Image (cartoon, grey):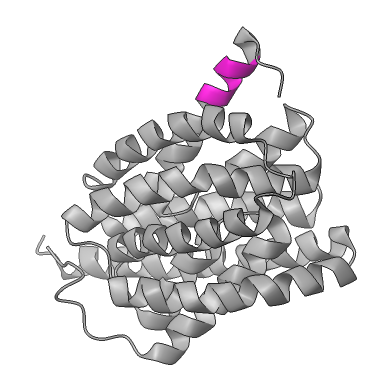
Amino acid sequence: MDITTTTILIAIVAGVGAGVLAGLFGVGGGVIFVPTLVLVFSFHQLDAQATSLAAIVPVAAVGAWRQSNDDNVYWRGAMLMGIGAAVGVVIGAEIATRIPDGTLSQVFGAVLLLSGGEMIVSASRRLKAKRASEPE
Amino acid sequence: MENANTLPKVSVYPLIGIGIVSGLFAAMFGIGGGVVIVPLLILLTRMPPRIAAATSLATLLLTSMIGTARYAGSGHIDWVAAIVIGVPAVVGVVIGISFQKRLPADWLIIAFGVLIIAIGLKLVFKL
């Protein structure tokens, strides 16, 4: 990466933005890191993905530590999912090399649309139920 | 307020299953997997959103370390870029967590749902 004032400023803005999303929603920030590295810094897709993973390590470490202080981390679940994820990474790398890039990201997008829709509908329903149960 | 110590025990299979799915997505798309972990934890294990988000970060610590170890030495990681973008993100995550404490859980889910629908639309229609 060429270090100039502009690239550093963009990296800081994107980095803080990704971190805020990470803290709010428990995502790592890769959703912001990868497109920023590809679109702004002209990284190749694979380099962007690998660099994004390295950037996620300190974010996840500090985030998990802060949340753990508030007893919000269900460690047993995190460990079990971590074991599953290690298996998934190996299988995923195999699949990714066999399916065209475009198809892969469309499938991923469709999964996001479905789960996002479900989350909004169920949360709205709970909010409505809460409002109805409150006295006038 | 609910915390992870008062949570009823979640069975092993959905947790490992969610882990595998998140690892699949992490390897295919270079994201940490949190975008998959958080909604699946809420949907399949009924975990409260705040705990799901915190637990997801702990899982990502493992996933990102495994992924980084796998790519380290391959020449694909630009360490300078990782630091330049990762350090501001560490500041951001502390800010995000303090915001999160002040937001009601259901509104948090709706905001997250809107975010992932936006990303989903972008991917499906190649915007």
Q: Is residue A93 visible?
A: yes
Q: Position of residue B27 (x, y in %)?
A: 68, 63
Q: Pick the quarter of the image with the C terminus of chain A.
A: bottom left
- Which of B80/B25 is in front? B80
Q: Position of residue B63 (x, y in %)?
A: 52, 63
- For the image, the number of numbered tags is 0
On the image, which quarter does residue B21 sit in? Answer: bottom right
Q: Among all residues in the image, which is located at the extreme front?
A: B73
- Give the vertical position of A108 relative to A79 (above or below): above
Q: Does the stretch in magenta take in B81?
A: no
On the image, which quarter does residue A26 sit in? Answer: bottom left
- Which of A2/A135 is in front? A2
Q: Please indicate whether residue A4 sits to the left or right of residue A25 in the image.
A: right
Q: Is residue A30 visible?
A: no
Q: Main secondary structure of the magenta part?
A: helix
Magenta residue span? A7-12
The residue depicted at 32 percent of the width and 54 percent of the height is A64
Q: Please indicate whether residue B85 sits to the left or right of residue A65 in the image.
A: right
Q: Position of residue A17 (x, y in %)?
A: 48, 33
Q: Does the stretch in magenta take in A8?
A: yes
Q: Position of residue B46 (x, y in %)?
A: 34, 78
- Give the vertical position of B108 relative to B77 (above or below): below
Q: Pick the quarter of the image with the N terminus of chain A.
A: top right
The residue depicted at 33 percent of the width and 45 percent of the height is A62
The residue depicted at 45 percent of the width and 35 percent of the height is B89
Q: Among all residues in the image, which is located at the extreme top?
A: A5
- Give the vertical position of A128 relative to A13 (above or below): below
On the image, which quarter does residue B3 sit in? Answer: bottom left
